[in-house]
Amino acid sequence: MNDILRQIFGPRRNVRGPRLRNAKDDGAWTESLDWQTNDYDFHQLVQRLCHRLDAHYRYEFGLRLVQLADMGELTSAARRAASWYHQAEHRYRTVGIHEYLYRELDRLVSKRARQVFDRRRKVAKDLLHPRDVQPLRMR
């Protein structure tokens, strides 16, 4: 049974990602960026967030970020969230853009990870407890 589950869920490998700073340092670094008007700075911010999300999902679930969403989807979701944050910034002075975008992107990716695990759980259940298996008839 453990072998079947290992095949379906996969071992925890490739969990060592890039060396990440702590979130507090990243938040301070983000404040030095001109992400609102400079596309390059915004791209750097999104790249840093994607590296952090990738490291989290690799370590916790054994999934790479590219298995859950492509970079275009993540960038467009980050742009939408950043524009909303920029419009409502006065309400969120206690939450920086780094933390806000991280939570928004994590929300998107976590929904997809849940779908992947639900599919894998269903496959594992079907493998362990097959239902309605008809014996083969010989003619």
Image: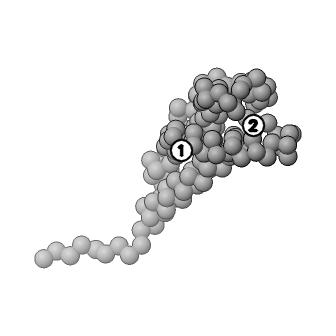
Give the residue at x 86% y 39%. 93
As rendered, which of 106 and 97 lies closer to the eye? 97
User: Does residue 55 show up?
Assistant: no
Give the residue at x 73% y 35%. 98
Which of the numbered marks, if any, corresponds to residue 62?
A: none
Coordinates of residue 16 in the picture (x, y in percent): 58, 28
As rendered, which of 118 and 66 lies closer to the eye? 66
Specify few, some or many for label 2: CA neighbours under 10 Å numbering under 14, 14-19, or 20 or more: many
Coordinates of residue 69 in the picture (x, y in percent): 52, 44
Which of the numbered marks, if any, corresponds to residue 73?
A: 1
Give the residue pinned by disc 2.
97
Q: Secondary structure at mark 1?
A: helix
Residue type for callout 2: Ile
- The quadrant the C terminus occupies is bottom left
Could you say which quadrant of the image residue 32 lies in? Answer: top right
Q: Secondary structure at mark 2?
A: helix
> Between disc 2 and disc 1, whose residue precedes?
1
As rendered, which of 122 and 19 lies closer to the eye? 19
Q: Is residue 46 left or right of residue 94?
A: left
